[in-house]
Image (cartoon, grey):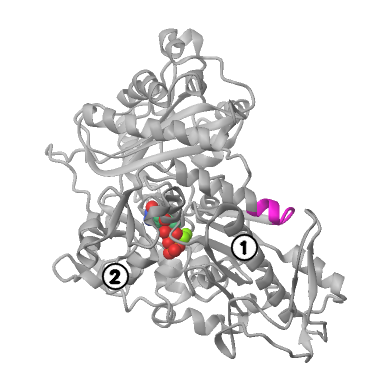
Amino acid sequence: MSSSVNDQRVIIQTDIDFFYGQVEELENPALKGQPFGVQQKHIIVTCNYIARGKGVRKLQLLGDALKACPELAIVNGEDLARYRVASKGIFHLVRSLVTGQKVERLGLDELFIDVTDMMEAHLTELGWNGDPDSTTVLDQIQTFRIPSNGQSFTYNPYNWIGFKIDNDGDRMSQSSQSQERLSWRTIKYHAASHLAAFIRNQIKERLGFTCSAGIATSKIFSKLAADIHKPNEQTLLCPDKYADFLEPLHIRKIMGIGYQASRTLCKKLGLMKDENQANEEDTLDDVDEAAQEGEAWYLPELTVSYVQQHCTLQQFLEWFGDRHGPVLWDLIHGIDTAQVIPTPLIPSQISIEDSFRVCKTMADATSRLHDLAIDFIKRLEVELRVKDEFVKYPTTLRLTTRNRGLNEDGTWRDSKGVRDTRISKSSRMPVDVFDLSRSIAERANALVEQSLLPMLRHLVKEPFALTLLNIAAAHLSTKRPAISIQNLFAKGKSALEHLPLRPDDIDESTWSDLPLDIQREIAQHHRSPTHDHDNISKIEETSFTSTTINTGPPTTTPPLPLLKRKRSNEEVDYDDDTGFAPSDYESMVLLGDGDETWDTCSICGKAMFTWGMQAHRLYHEKEARNQD
Ligand code: DCP
Ligand code: MG
Ligand code: MG
């Protein structure tokens, strides 16, 4: 735990209390004072604290929630647009409060704020010589000035706000008259707790939301701290208590250890049960995933200390690879050197996604695309529209699907344990999407009929078994695209340029962030084997689109998981049906959800994502046939 103790950073994490619920309450104050939950599909995604007091939990099946609290009022939370607007407002406000400091969005309701520089500048103003262990005596009233915006507040450096966990336990701040010597380190964290309180007050006063906050030296501990006292509280977690604090926690509490990583640990440690052995308490908080996989594990046993005691670094390297292994190992030992990466005000790409058990017909897919397209356009407006105009225009439209496919005998492939292949097709973004004179429904309709459906038909032919649809917008430009949906498809080849194909060893999001001309240049110099064998599965190139099949990077080492950390840093690239980057809540931050485990090819020894293995095998088969 030494590197955490030596970490001199000050990171504040904020998490809005029952976020969707507060958005609903602000819109309909009649909800206040009664237990209510927000429903998406068959799940109560969140509920207010009155409902929690009656036994309702977040991410609980609707039926179970009603069993726990029959008088639970239900609010439909399928439309994420209002939550996104609120999220953006909170982000903008906090950014303006701490101008010049790094602010990173995580999911819709969390922020990491690295205020180290601001705190050190303040301490220097108070006479600090730069040594955190030196001590001083200060007046009980100090003024904290935020130089960049002229705001200030007064505080008592002998006191902290909210709770503080150190060697004296977990206790609330009390008024103190003490004039003893304080270390500058203590002053720094006390002052940071006052700054956190100032930020929380501003969010409440200006936007109406209560939130919890955690203050610590790293992202992981600030997030864990914020979670200790909820709602509407804050906790300062001191480094000398990190080890004690971490050990009893469930492994899933560790940001970066998600569904797949904890599943791997359970399997390796022999804690996995099958459907028949599992009881209700054993199932993970991820009801969707657990139900889909039909499996469960011993929740109570999988604590950080259990893993610390029963695993070795060598095993972590074997199970998670040379790159993931050490990072996960560090995390379970409280070491997190990950930086707060500022989230830009305007995202570099936007995508929305719906995953489902199965979709087998074009009619069903069309209806799902319609719903998704409406959400997609609303989302473009939330992120890119200021008043009556768009400030940025994504120039590329991408549709991604995941197809379960058929077994050789014609039966549907079992979803259990199967990691399916994602395939995508890109085209240029039709300008009609930005036509604010037309309703969202009209634009969505046109987008589906004239862009997305033709793309989908290129991607899959019936019979199929889709489990995911994702629509993405990339390559943002300040210029409005010139091509309408109609022209895009009517003029065919002559009106359109080929979109370059992504080389296998470039990660999809890195690729889509590159300007088109750079992509072309790279693609020209980089004809990968996958792209040369155009009969591999679904690789196609048409006059108007390009298709990419994710076979994973053809490198000899596993793909770099840390790159996936960008999901939490990434410009609001919330990626699933809830509006959340799965990374944030499941596992993609470090280990990825199922799509980010990897295998080694038994033929060529290349390491690649598991979901790419099937296509990769086809490549070898084709290669072998060619040689024959
Ligand atoms: N959410 C979701 N699906 C998930 C996780 C979260 O739809 N798998 C949504 C609902 C929440 C919001 O995201 O309102 C924020 O998630 P939190 O985990 O922070 O939960 P809440 O803010 O609702 O409650 P808390 O007071 O515990 O923070
Ligand atoms: Mg929250
Ligand atoms: Mg949250």
- Residue 166 spot, x, y in % from top left: 60, 85
Q: Is mark 2 within 8 Å of ligand 1?
A: no
Looking at the rendered structure, the secondary structure element under dot 2 is: loop
State which quarter of the image contains the N terminus. bottom right
Q: On screen, 78 above or below 544?
A: below
In the image, residue 18 lies at what x, y percent?
43, 60
Q: How many marks?
A: 2
Name the spot of residue 284 as percent of width and height, x first: 30, 66
**Residue hosting label 2:** 55
| Element on which disc 1 rests | helix
Residue 503 lies within the magenta run: no
Say which of marks 2 and 1 sits in front.
1
User: Residue 26 vs residue 269: left or right?
Assistant: right
Question: Dot 2, how many residues are within 10 Å of its Cα: few (below 14), some (14-19), or many (20+)?
Answer: some
Q: Is residue 220 visible?
A: yes
- Residue at coordinates 31% horizontally, 44% vertically from top-left? 355
Magenta stretch: residue 100 in it? yes
> Which amino acid type is shown beneath numbered disc 1?
Asn
Horizontal side of 109 relative to 525 (left or right) equals: left
Instruction: Identify the residue at image location x=19%, y=30%.
Output: 463
Q: Nearer the viewer, residue 14 or 415?
A: 14
Magenta segment: 94-101
Q: Decide: is 614 above or below 498.
A: below
The residue depicted at 33 percent of the width and 23 percent of the height is 453
Mark closer to the chain start, 2 or 1? 2
- What is the number of the mark on residue 523? none
Residue that numbered label 1 is attached to: 201
Q: Quadrant of residue 545?
A: top left
Q: For this rendering, which residue is in front, 328 or 44? A: 44
Q: Residues within 10 Å of mark 1 (few under 14, many from 20)?
A: some
